[in-house]
Image (tube, grey):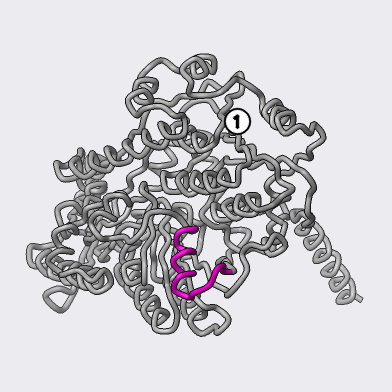
Amino acid sequence: MKAEGLKIWAVVFSALVLSLGLSGFVPAKLYEDSVLVMNVEGAVPEYTPFNPFWGLFAPAPLTVTDKVMVLRKASVDRNVKALVVAVRDNSMGMGKAQELRDAILRYRKSGKPAACCIEMEGQADLSYYLASSCDQIYVSPASFMSVNGLTQLHFYLGGFFEKVKLSVQVLKVKEYKTFGDTLSRRDMSPFDREMSEALLNSSWDQFLNGIAAGRNKSKAEIAGYIDQDLLLPEKYQAAGMVDGVKYLDEVIDGLKKAGGNKDLAVVKEREYAAISPQALGVNVGPKVAVIYGVGSIVNLDPGGSPWYGSIMPAEITVMELEEAAKDDSIKGVIFRVDSPGGSALASDLIWRATQKLREKKPLVVSMSDVAGSGGYYISAGADAIVAHPGTLTGSIGVVSAHIGARGLLGWLQVGTTVLSKGTYAQVDNWTRPWTESEQAKEMDGITGVYNLFVDRVSKGRKMSKEDVDKIGKGRVYTGLQAKELGLVDELGGIDVATEIIKKKLGVKDLRLVYHRKPITLWKILLGKTQEDLVGAMFGPVAVDLKNQLVLNSMYKDGEKLFLSPTIRLE
């Protein structure tokens, strides 16, 4: 009887979970004569892991590539008469902003109007940059947004480690490999400053060019307006930076009237996303897998919360690439990379899987916000590399660090005794600093790893090792700079990557099949709770610092890393 009762409860619980889960999904249907409303808010993730429990508490957020597909469908759908993009607080990087921006511009080529309504207060530079891709921009009456220009924030923890009596020894190849500076320095090195200023200048030029083109003004005019006290919506309107001050519903009503049909339906992007692209005659043809390489690269999934946005375990990524190589129904692969790098070993294992895949079918890399260091390593062997002008990439270099606790242990009056055999047996001994001979051995190791990195890039990009070394040295570039140097082939997003695959296969269209890594509900909730709690209590800067500290803790003492410095534009 007891067993029967447990079975009944199991069935009831399963039915409850299933019903709640299904409540997060919207049935697909085609709409007649509609205004499509798209939201750009929150994290705007590169991808959402597969989870059968999505919908239990909230529907899965739409990814950047989901939104791109929504816009592609809307551009050919006769029933979609206009587009409204509602922009709210978000955490997009330059690459994602350009991905969405380009998709809106492609939509506008259909001749349909696209209006943006900004509902923000505070910093809104990249949001306004995105909005400038629409032919009309409106701002809600109480949106006192700030378009102040681009800035970078760099953390240096060397003084902190000194305070807590921990010694930090950083070895790197070469001078622009500044990730280790976060651990060892108190301030910015000359090489770091040179690189960071070059990145900022390139991004600033792209930023001004995009807005100037969208608002039909000169770069000088836009730069001048940004330097003015434009905070009130009316001031933006007077300067010609926006077309009016309206609420979102007023923007929608205005498009209805302009189209001569007040009865146009309003369709939200989530509803519209559920419509099959094939029903509209797009995304048809040979299957091409979109495999995501997102997050910091590690060898094995360490579990726990999805730190720093997400993690790219080599064991899972290699498996996905191998499965795509074996699947005869898959005719090509787009490898979507959004990663600052990580473990050198894990990066090389993923690189090896890309080469085995290329023996059977074409592989094109599409870079998002960042594909630096290990993120570039795993991309270097592709048939073609596509990056946004604002993507952060390159960082061909290696770094290794050792933290010694001798000072801290002494201050705490904790005694230690280490017994060992072998000259280098204590190289991983965290109770003391590296000796000179141990440093020399570690330096030999990372130099060898750097040479391997250079060799991979040399073969993949068909460049001499000498030329790779000249532009390597750990230096980060924007996608625009990287194309000029031959590190990427084309500028653009996943749409450009798709066009390259089409040409390689000799077809007019493709059916993109998106691969989503599985993840547990607990992992999703735990990671989101951590991020939200820190952000609510201490603000976004504290979130960045927390992420930096957690990222540093992901790797073992002395591990060889293809990891680029964390550079975030705001």
Report whether residue 184 is seen: yes
Magenta residue span: 494-510
Please give the name of the residue rendered at 22% of the width and 58% of the height, measured from the top-left corner.
401
Indicate left or right for 351 with 538 as reference.
left
Towards the viewer: 256 or 247: 256
Quick one: 557 or 308, which is closer to the camera? 308
Q: Is residue 505 magenta?
A: yes
* Image-based side of 279 in relation to 435, left or right: right
Q: Position of residue 376 (x, y in %)?
A: 32, 62
Q: Quadrant of residue 190?
A: top left
Q: Residue 424, relative to residue 259: is it above or below? A: below
Q: Secondary structure at mark 1?
A: strand
- Residue 355, magenta (yes or no): no
Q: Name the one closer to the observer, 362 or 174.
A: 362
Residue 466: name its quadrant.
bottom left
Taking the image as drawn, is residue 530 in sight?
Answer: no
Which one is in front, 276 or 169?
Answer: 276
Q: In the rendered image, which quarter is residue 233 located in?
A: top right
Q: Which residue is mark 1?
A: 117
Q: Which residue is pictured at 43% across the width and 44% down the height?
A: 93
